Image (cartoon, grey):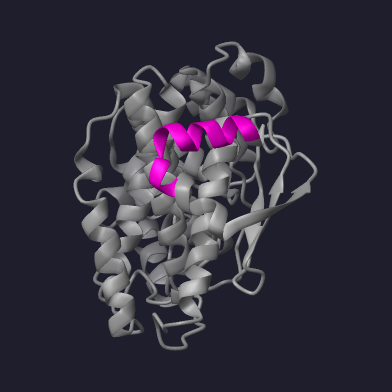
Amino acid sequence: MVDSAWQLLSAHLPDVAEALPAGLESLVPTPEVAFRLPSASTGEAFGSAIVAYSGDSEQLAAALVHEFHHIRLGGVQHLAALHVDDPRERLYVPWRDDPRPIGGALHGIYAFFGVTAFWRALATAEQGNASAAFEFALWRAAVDRTLSSVREDESLTAAGRRFLDGIAAEFGSWPAEPVAAEPGVWATAAAADHYATWRLRHLRPHAGAVATLARAWCRGDAWPKLEEPLEPRIPTPVPDGGWTDARTDLIRLRLGRDRDALAERGPVVPGVTQADLALVSGDVEAAVRGYRSLLATDPDVPAALVGLGLALTARGTGPAARALLHRPELVRAVHRELRATADADPEVEAVAEWIGRFTH
């Protein structure tokens, strides 16, 4: 499998393949993990990476590039400080389920810049490779978003700004390059899924604003004047609710070379629900019904709240879909307040509809 991954790198990223053996000379194998390819490295163990066994040479090639970039940046950071010491866990990055400090964000940007370069080259060489097109679209959006959010961060040093400027210059026009329709649509959905779930787990709306909104709902009013900001400036690292990547795992099965994989392996994806299977299979109405049923049982579950937002968006844009994907933490907080204080127990979708009419 390493031989196959190496052939891919040599064919599609020859410059990286030439440099990689100088920075990644030792692989420590760990057991295979279904639907995942976990890997890790550290700047304190230059040249070594832990990589799980894999049956997918393309994903393994991407993992080798990923860890090589981490190792190379670790070496750079022994020579130059890219940021001042700032351990605050405050930044959203689309490849983690927790808020990250600036140092972690910089490492992720560089690692996924390399990953994006690999998938871009493979998707260009193999025009019919839907998996490569999906991965390229997904990770270029992740890098572009994070790069834009941190380039002016106050914690960066002059060297750190030069570092990011260099990545941005090479990244260049990648965000505007065309991607096949189906992989592009699913990449957009996967990115929205991750961001909305992260918001639900790590953003806490101001209690005063939530109470004001709940009272306005009970009176049947329009959007009230709020004294407090809706969105906190700093996320909390303590999550509220669980996390599952089941829908993205299903998307990868759908777009893979084995067209039967979604039907055969989808039901055993960790954390998957029937609503998830319906959504990724294209049965949007069944997905909507499924997520509504899950929320009727437990209206606080992040996967069901965001899943309903994705399903409603697939059916057509509307206020509830917008709120569930862009302000899901506010929808859940107001719904919780209403359940605790109001006589009625409204459906979470109705609360989302109301909030979506007045927010963006």
Q: Position of 152 compared to 202: left or right?
A: left
Can residue 228 be seen from the camera position used here?
Answer: no
Depth check: give the residue in front, 346 or 61: 61
> Residue 293's image quarter?
top right
Q: Is residue 105 above or below residue 234?
A: above
Number of marks: 0
Q: Is residue 357 above or below residue 317?
A: below
Give the residue at x 48% y 38%: 9
Give the residue at x 34% y 81%: 156
Give the residue at x 20% y 51%: 172
Depth check: give the residue in front, 219 or 185: 185
Residue 188: give x, y in percent of width and height: 36, 38
Per the picture, the main secondary structure of the magenta-coloured stretch is helix
**Which stretch is magenta?**
3-16
14 inside magenta stretch: yes
In this view, the residue farthest toward the top is 260
Can residue 25 be seen from the camera position used here?
Answer: yes
24 inside magenta stretch: no
Residue 84: give x, y in percent of width and height: 41, 88
Residue 207: give x, y in percent of width and height: 46, 75
Q: Position of 2 compared to 313: left or right?
A: right
Depth check: give the residue in front, 340 or 197: 197
Depth check: give the residue in front, 99 or 55: 55
